[in-house]
Image: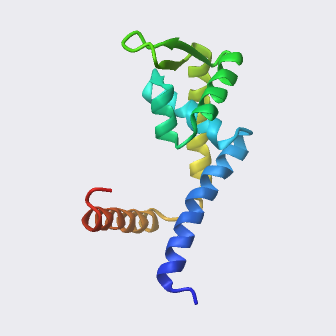
Amino acid sequence: METPEDRFFRELGGACGETRQAFARHVGMSSSRLQLLMRLWRNGETSHSELRQGLSLDGASVTRLIKEFEAEGLVSRRIDPADNRYTLASLTSTGERAAADLERSHQAYQVRLLDGISAGEREIVLRALERLRANMVRIDPVG
């Protein structure tokens, strides 16, 4: 039998995952491609290793995506001058424009998703999420 707690976490997890996937479908891009492109836009030049860890992707997937973006003129790669074992990726000017367009599209999409949800309702959800995260730190301070 599903408890109220079970339902809460099922709905929370489902809403997060479905929202991410829905926007990726909306812009016609896989979630992994979208996340990698936006990570480079927000963080600037980043090693493949950091992308792999930050996006929870395997190394082969990161390399494949970076090579696809490079072929599309969105990303450039270079060997890390501080440690030639690592490859750094960064957006080209075309990639910067594409990411900025995606960010604007994401902002408009979020407004549409929040239609009919009042500012007060959003604030209640935010407070609940803040409390949830504080409880996680209290219960598992290392995590």
Image height of 101 relative to 14, above or below: above
The residue shown at (61%, 27%) is 63
How many numbered marks are there? 0
The residue shown at (36%, 12%) is 82
The residue shown at (60%, 50%) is 20
119 or 51, nearer to the observer: 51
Q: Residue furthest top?
A: 81
Quadrant including the N terminus: bottom right
Spot occupied by residue 32 in the image (x, y as percentages of width and height): 63, 40
65 or 74, nearer to the observer: 65
Q: Is residue 84 visible?
A: yes
Q: Is residue 116 visible?
A: no
Q: Which quadrant of the figure has residue 19?
A: bottom right
Spot occupied by residue 140 in the image (x, y as percentages of width and height): 29, 63
Spot occupied by residue 9 in the image (x, y as percentages of width and height): 50, 72
Q: Residue furthest bottom?
A: 1
Spot occupied by residue 96 in the image (x, y as percentages of width and height): 56, 21
Left/right of residue 63 with respect to residue 4 in the rendered view: right
